[in-house]
Image (cartoon, rainbow, N blue to C red):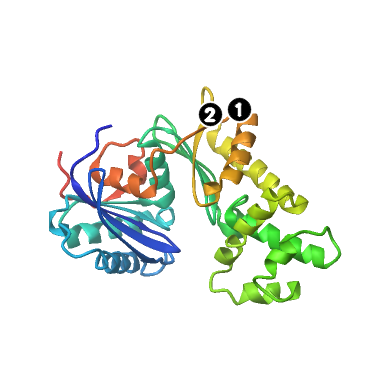
Amino acid sequence: MEASNDVVLVADVGKSRCRVELRRGDELLGAADQHGFPGVHVDNGPTLAFDLLLETVSLLPPGLPLSGITGIGAAVAGVEASAEKSQELATMLSQRFSVPAAVLSDATAAQLGALQGAPGTTLIVGTGAVAFRFDDAGVLHRADGWGPYLGDRGSGRWIGQQGLQAVLEAHDGGPATSLSAAAGALVESPEMLPGWLAASENPYRAMARFAPLVLHAAEAGDAVARNIIGEACRILTNTVKRASGTEPGTPRVAMLGGVVGSDFFAALLRKSLASAGIEVVAPLGDGLDGAALAATRRGLIQERYIHRDGTNWPD
């Protein structure tokens, strides 16, 4: 696929972080980021997302050709929960910048960027975990991504939570683990962990921040940590299998997210996926690349999951 030379504004408006970039084709002209927001589906969500995006745009380096943009692509948290509010946000962005705007979920954008619009499966393992597959007809098949209460098994939050639970089990007389010493960087005593977590602004993110310590302990040979990581790989392999469904031929998956940024974990997960007959392919891009693709192309197989403003689009 040829890269477009259009100047586009792309955004990843997530729950933990808002990132914006100004791009000309494959060239990055400028970038800015700050805090995230609860999601476009909440009360007043479109306005919250709109204001946050504009505020982040104001942090871009001065002198960029914002007046020359030809489109906007925004990957936004909460899109899958409210098509109406996503459409409202697209309209607000289009009217503000007088260009076409496309709003899509962060997971759809990640799949779109990873496979550059082609059908296939993407596994995203960050604080949460979800597998997204678009088939040849553009129909979405997903597995997990159900949030920290009911799902996201094998995610960074899940790994961190299992590690913290193991520390408390060791404190109660269960299997000893080097994770107990790692938790000492958080609290003076394991007995203080529940209070520390309750006082966290975002408990799920706090648990996810313990995941790298679990990975480090597992890589160093800690048996308890290795069991946690092994189980995470089994869970994520099953998540991919469920999303892949009856996909003909050898299932293929691209992996994205902070947790698979660990070479140690990625190697174990690739081995687990291979044992299930699933081939891992290198992602061609990320969520911001997917947002850029949505901003510059129509007729994508994922089109029914992209909310456009409905005006200004060429025939």
The crowding category of the residue bearing disc 1, from other C-alpha atoms within 10 Å (few below 14, some 14 to 19, many at least 20), is: few
- Judged from this view, the residue extending furthest toward the left is 67
Which image quarter is the N terminus in?
top left
Residue 191 lies, in percent from the top left, at 75, 75
The crowding category of the residue bearing disc 2, from other C-alpha atoms within 10 Å (few below 14, some 14 to 19, many at least 20), is: many
Front one among 150 and 163: 163
Residue drawn 43% across the image and 52% down it:
80
Q: In this orientation, does residue 18 appear?
A: yes
- Seen in the picture, residue 179 relative to 7 is either above or below; the reply is below
- Seen in the picture, residue 230 relative to 216 is either above or below; the reply is above
- Seen in the picture, residue 119 relative to 154 is either above or below; the reply is above
Could you tell me the amino acid type at mark 1? Gly
Residue drawn 25% across the image and 64% down it:
60
Mark 2 near mark 1, Cβ–Cβ under 8 Å?
yes
Residue drawn 74% across the image and 72% down it:
190
Front one among 78 and 51: 51
Looking at the rendered structure, which numbered label has been put on residue 251? 2
Residue 157 lies, in percent from the top left, at 60, 58
Sequence order check: which comes first, mark 2 or mark 1?
2
Residue drawn 60% across the image and 27% down it:
277
Looking at the rendered structure, which numbered label has been put on residue 277? 1
Residue 266 lies, in percent from the top left, at 57, 42
Front one among 167 and 178: 178
Looking at the rendered structure, which numbered label has been put on residue 257? none
Label 2 element class: loop
- CA–CA distance in space, label 2 to label 1: 7 Å
Could you tell me the amino acid type at mark 2? Pro
Left or right, 259 with respect to 272, comes to left
Which image quarter is the C terminus in?
top left
Left or right, 297 with respect to 17, comes to left
Q: In this orientation, does residue 40 appear?
A: no
